[in-house]
Image (tube, helix red, strand yellow):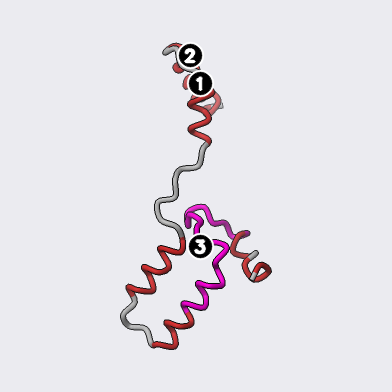
Amino acid sequence: MKEARARRDLIAGEIANGRNPRLLLGQLRAAPPIIKPLAAWAVDYRESRIDLADQTREAMKSHLRSMQTLAERDPARITPGDVRGLPASS
C-alpha cells in the first residue's frame, strides 16, 4: 500500500507540473547504464594479482574465455541462473 501511495503521489506531482507521467515512469523502468562490464572487472582483477604463478594466470585466462557470454554484462545484474547456464553454453 505504501508503494501504491508513493506511485500515486509521483504521478500526481508530474501532472500538477504539466508533465506526462508516462515519460518519467519510462525513465525509472529503463536499466541504468553499465559503468564497467564484467570483462573489464575480470581483467583488472587478474592484472592486480602480482602473486600468481604463471600456471594460475593462464588458468584465469581460460576461465575468462569460458565466460564470454557474460563479458559485456553489468556484474550487478548477473543472476545465478546466468551463471548456471554457462557450462551449457560453452
Specify the amino acid type for callout 1: Pro
Mark 2: give few (<14), some (14-19) or many (20+) Cα within 10 Å.
few
Which residue in the protein does label 1 denote? 21
Q: Report which quarter residue 16 is drawn in.
A: top left
Q: Are marks 2 and 1 in contact (CB under 8 Å)?
A: yes
Q: Nearer the viewer, mark 1 or mark 3?
A: 3
Q: Is residue 51 left or right of residue 5?
A: left
- Above or below, 7 relative to 35: above
What quarter of the picture does the N terminus occupy? Answer: top right
Which residue in the protein does label 2 denote? 15
Specify the amino acid type for callout 2: Ile
What quarter of the picture does the C terminus occupy? Answer: bottom right
Q: Nearer the viewer, mark 3 or mark 2?
A: 3
* Lower position in the chain sequence, tag 3 or tag 2: 2
Residue 78 included in the magenta stretch of the image? yes
- State the extent of the magenta-drawn residues as a range: 60-81
Specify the amino acid type for callout 3: Ala
- In space, the residues marked 2 and 1 are separated at their CA atoms by 7 Å
Residue at screen point 44% across, 84% down: 56
Which residue in the protein does label 3 denote? 71
Q: Secondary structure at mark 2?
A: helix
* Lower position in the chain sequence, tag 2 or tag 1: 2
* Lower position in the chain sequence, tag 1 or tag 3: 1
Q: Residue 40: x percent and y percent? A: 41, 63
